[in-house]
Amino acid sequence: MRLLVIFFALFFSSPLFGVEVSPIIGLGQENLGLEAGKFIQNSDKNFKFQPNIAGVLRLGVSAFGFSVGYSFRGSEKEIDPAKAKTDMTEIQLGYNAENWGIDGFYQTYKGFFTEGTNTTQNYQDLELKHYGFISRYAFNDSEFSVGGLLDQSYPVTQTASKLYLVGGISEDVMNTDVSLLQMENAGIDQGFEDLRKLRSFAVKLGAGLGHYWVSDSRFFVGGLFDALASYANYKFESTTGDSTLSDSTMSFNVKIGLGYSGEKYKSGLSLSTDITNLKTPGRGLLSPSSNRILVYFRWLADF
């Protein structure tokens, strides 16, 4: 509700300040999933924990290079009512200039079901949190923009590429009241089976490369790939006691965008996947992945 107030306040007050405001509305699918199976010691299975959401609606606004977006459930319906119900919160903040930018994110999901197990298992109280920020600084000058690629919050005008230095911080939290390994997976990794809470605070540094092609008719398609080394401090709570760990892993971001970049009206499709690898007690890994598909429409309210 507060975002809606900000949205309309910025839109209707822009004539007073001479601001070019660019509202956006989109429909799509977002989820924060958790891959576990293939990373667990002695496991030959690949299973995941998935949220039960049919679709999302996103509202946002851009001004002065800043953007804010809020995603919420477009329907209270689940993909399957027999599976755990998911509650979610998604907030995105960003600023994109010509040669640098910063993106903040806050995601919380509670309620998951298993995918890839012999029998679907519901984890109504399993909660995942993922928040932090990623910043980029370009090594070269060009018209490429990450904001332009994803939702045209920055003008897309010509074919361009950029190489980025990428860094940031993030915190990931996993809470569960029961073991994540049950039924056919019980007993394959005792340290993982005893785990009830994981908290990771990571510092990330790496590089990214982005490119898009823009036609004479202003249609465009492009992508961005980031590879980052993460060094994290972990706190574990298990049925056998608490423990800590400091270790490094890799994380990856893949973003794809396509659309039409008209002078006043803009539309497109964007896809993104952000994969984080988290250590667990023993030699296992948990891999949260934040996935987004968005069909959007944007217009320039230039008063």
Image (cartoon, grey):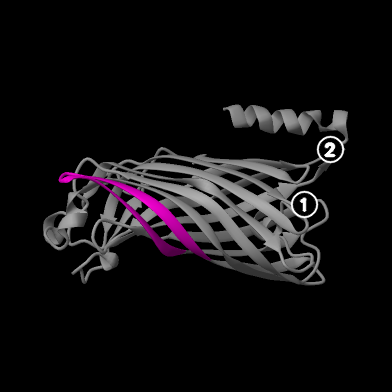
Q: Which residue is mark 2?
A: 19
Name the residue: 21% across, 51% down: 121
Q: Amino acid at mark 2?
A: Val
144 left or right of 291?
A: right
- Badge 1 element: strand
**Of label 1 and label 2, which has the lower sequence position?**
2
Q: Which residues are magenta?
A: 228-250
56 left or right of 175?
A: right
Marks 1 and 2 in Cβ contact (< 8 Å): no
Name the residue: 43% across, 41% down: 108
- Examine the residues drawn in magenta and state their main secondary structure: strand
Q: Which residue is mark 1?
A: 265
Name the residue: 61% across, 67% down: 208
Q: Of residues 241 and 102, which is closer to you in this image?
A: 241
Quadrant placement of the C terminus: top right
Q: Of residues 142 and 216, which is closer to you in this image?
A: 142
- Whole-percent x, y for residue 75 in the image: 45, 40
Does residue 49 show up? yes
